[in-house]
Amino acid sequence: MIFETHAHYDDDAFEEDREALLAQLPENGIGYVVNIGASLRSVKSSIALAEKYEYIYASAGIHPSDTDQLNEENFAWLKQQCSHPSVVAVGEIGLDYHYEDPERKIQKEWFARQLDLAREVKKPIIIHSREAAQDTYEIMKAHKAQENKGVIHCFSYTKETAKQYLDWNYYFGIGGVVTFKNAKKLKEAVEYIPIENILLETDCPYMAPTPHRGERNSSLYLPLVAEAIGEIKGISTEEVIAITEKNAMNFYGIV
């Protein structure tokens, strides 16, 4: 079965057909889904989905673009959510320098605080890092992120950056971008990263693979991602699915 490690089914893009789409997933070979908390609102809605669907789990974290929402009161609330039985990770957290806001000082402060939270609650970490490779690594190292299991979600850096995280035995979330013709850097990284450190993800509704690029993404397109990884690795799509499922079960601690 395919393990979808990073989805956003609480997004407004699924408002009209969410229940119908989610009902299709198991019959199309999607065995597990982790719906990612990325804001205060989406942590609540991710947990709600996990409570409703047996095969959906949740994470709890605040995306760097939403860190200006955080204060001591709602950070304490976030910590409480980490003890929910369906919450399997802290994330997605990290740094995003693509836009000016929130200012980098705020992003760094709450990234560090959430890394410390993950260590405290002993949960794996889901990392978002965009145009911030060095700062991400330095903050993670300073806050002993190597003591937790972690995944670099939507990995988009070089194989040299991948090596830094492989030294910590981290995982790498690979999605639709690996099917793009111009994704040379990512394909080189996927070739370099051991298959035992790769997780399948969509980041849906974003990042749909070729030939659906530009459309709303969903877990139903993950076989295309697995096929692309298999071509790079010289193994079958079925092997990619089986190995990455095992990887995800280990990462999230699902038995």
Image (cartoon, grey):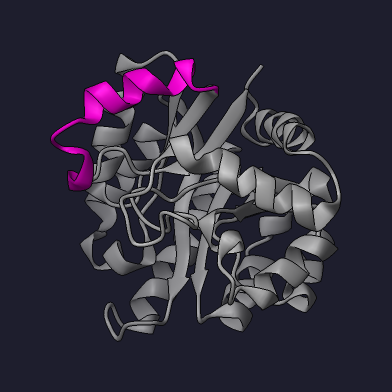
Dominant SS of magenta comes to helix
Q: Relative to 209, is 53 on the left or the right?
A: left
Q: Quadrant of residue 222?
A: top right
The magenta segment is: 12-29
Quadrant (top left/top right/bottom left/bottom right) for the N terminus: top right
Q: Please, is residue 69 above or below residue 231 in the view?
A: below
Q: Please, is residue 28 above or below residue 186 in the view?
A: above
Q: Residue at x 32, y 34 (%)?
A: 46
Q: Residue at x 25, y 59 (%)?
A: 71
Of 26 and 155, nearer the camera is 26
Q: Please, is residue 219 above or below residue 129 in the view?
A: above
Of 1 and 119, nearer the camera is 1
Q: Is residue 224 visible?
A: yes
Q: Residue at x 42, y 82 (%)?
A: 97
| Residue 201 in picture, x, y percent from top left | 54, 46
Q: Quadrant of residue 57?
A: top left
- Is residue 19 inside the magenta stretch? yes
Work out which residue is located at the far bottom of the displayed protein and give it.
100
Q: Quadrant of residue 15?
A: top left
Q: Relative to 193, is 228 on the left or the right?
A: left
Q: Please, is residue 242 above or below residue 111 in the view?
A: above
| Residue 168 in picture, x, y percent from top left | 80, 57
- Is residue 100 inside the magenta stretch? no
Quadrant (top left/top right/bottom left/bottom right) for the C terminus: top right
Q: How many numbered marks, from 0 up? A: 0
| Residue 233 in picture, x, y percent from top left | 83, 53
Q: Residue at x 67, y 53 (%)?
A: 228
Q: Is residue 149 visible?
A: no
| Residue 252 in picture, x, y percent from top left | 61, 33
Of 184 and 96, nearer the camera is 184
